[in-house]
Image (spheres, coloured by chain):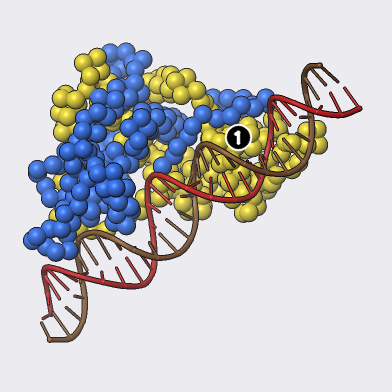
Chain colours: A yellow, B blue, C brown, D red
Amino acid sequence: MSRKNKCEHTSDQLPKLGIQPYLNLMEKTALQNTDRKLAHLGLLMLWLGDNAIDVIDLNLEKFGITECKWDVLLLLTLHEDRELITPSSLADRLGIRRASVTALLDWLEKRHWIIREQSTLDGRKIHVKITQEGRELVARALPVFWSACSSIMSELEEEERMLLEKILMKLNSSMEKKLGVGR
Amino acid sequence: MSRKNKCEHTSDQLPKLGIQPYLNLMEKTALQNTDRKLAHLGLLMLWLGDNAIDVIDLNLEKFGITECKWDVLLLLTLHEDRELITPSSLADRLGIRRASVTALLDWLEKRHWIIREQSTLDGRKIHVKITQEGRELVARALPVFWSACSSIMSELEEEERMLLEKILMKLNSSMEKKLGVGR
DNA sequence: TATTTTAGTTAGATAATCTAATTATATGTA
DNA sequence: TACATATAATTAGATTATCTAACTAAAATA
């Protein structure tokens, strides 16, 4: 996780450069066949993504939970009563190793937000479920989560939103294809 | 950092839900005054940001370096011969604690990519510089970095790019203001 | 000069990941 | 059916990126 808090103050700070020096550097160092405009956008997206994650983490902090654990609880919520959810399938969906899921589930179970039940059909499998307490946490956190999501995007004009929606959907599906993951 | 590698395979996977179930959940659980459209966009941005970071990390992996150390080297590169760069000013710029910077610098110094020099003017201060070896690493990694940035954004039409550029610049500056950080 | 502030580090902790090894249960084949 | 193989989950041990609190040394201030 990245738990970036307030930073201490210094007398001689590094000046904020903005994006221009990065673009100058790109001009000198990118391969010929690299599309400068696209790289520029990608760099902005990277910065924005970093910041978006920080905003969400800052908001979830109040609930004693991080984005990564939040993802697990959301998955359990959305798939509840539909699929049998195992640590393996969570690992698969989250794009992390089973061992990492074990650690996440240990943490969540210790706080009584999830339970593990041995499957009766296949003794190797564990059935992971959100508990009532977990459901209550999610219910408290969801409104804050949505408002944090929207705060990332405030300041957009109506017109810009429409365009952005189309573009983000497109980018997301192409990237998921590239990385071989998906929500 | 997040070092998400390939995930193992399971027989019964969780189906990919896509965004619709998230939007349904939002309908039920967002506050009245939360703009649904904006929250939808924010959610997409969050996902996209996660993925963008993964793409960049995957590409930097070849150079034995992570995004966070890459950020340090880029800062040192861009400010070289302009400002005196101290651990404090790096902490300030990166939005992390001085102690965290010490750890990053220890790691980079061990690999001879940076050096620390005691300031002659102020005995408390350390002057951090990128070394020749560090410069060479950056020179090798930069073309890959730019091409990774552009790969995040490939598949966009010319028209979409123009719009996106304006929007991303705007969002980024508003978010930096909100978080009190900046590049 | 004595006190306070600043810069950097150290020590010790937590979170989120990893790989490799281990255990138990299924499955499949000879 | 028995043995070998595959699968699911966990454990053990490591790394990375962060944190806070305490410490040391140097500079600034009162």
User: For the residue marked with disc 1, what is the amino acid?
Assistant: Leu
Q: How many marks?
A: 1
Asked whether B31 or B136 is in front, the reply is B136
Image quadrant where one finds the C terminus of chain B: top left
Asked whether A148 or B62 is in front, the reply is B62
Compared across the picture, whether B176 is left or right of B28 comes to: left
The answer to whether residue A155 shows anywhere in this view is: no
User: Residue at position x 32%, y 32% from top?
Assistant: B63
The answer to whether residue B50 shows anywhere in this view is: yes
User: Residue at position x 34%, y 37% from top?
Assistant: B65
Residue that label 1 marks: A90
Image quadrant where one finds the N terminus of chain B: top left
User: Residue at position x 30%, y 51% from top?
Assistant: B106
- Where does the image place residue B147, in percent across and percent down from the top left? 29, 22
Compared across the picture, whether A122 is left or right of B54 comes to: right
Asked whether A77 or B153 is in front, the reply is B153
Mark 1 surroundings: few (<14), some (14-19) or many (≥20) residues within 10 A: many
| Residue A12 in which image quadrant | bottom left
- Where does the image place residue A24, in percent across and percent down from the top left? 15, 28
Classify A68 as above or below C12.
above
User: Residue at position x 15%, y 33% from top?
Assistant: A21
Classify B20 as above or below A105.
above
Classify C8 as above or below B135.
below
- Disc 1 sits on a residue from what chain? A
Compared across the picture, whether A158 is left or right of C26 comes to: left
- Where does the image place residue A128, in percent across and percent down from the top left? 68, 40
Q: Disc 1 on helix, strand or loop?
A: helix
| Residue A25 in which image quadrant | top left
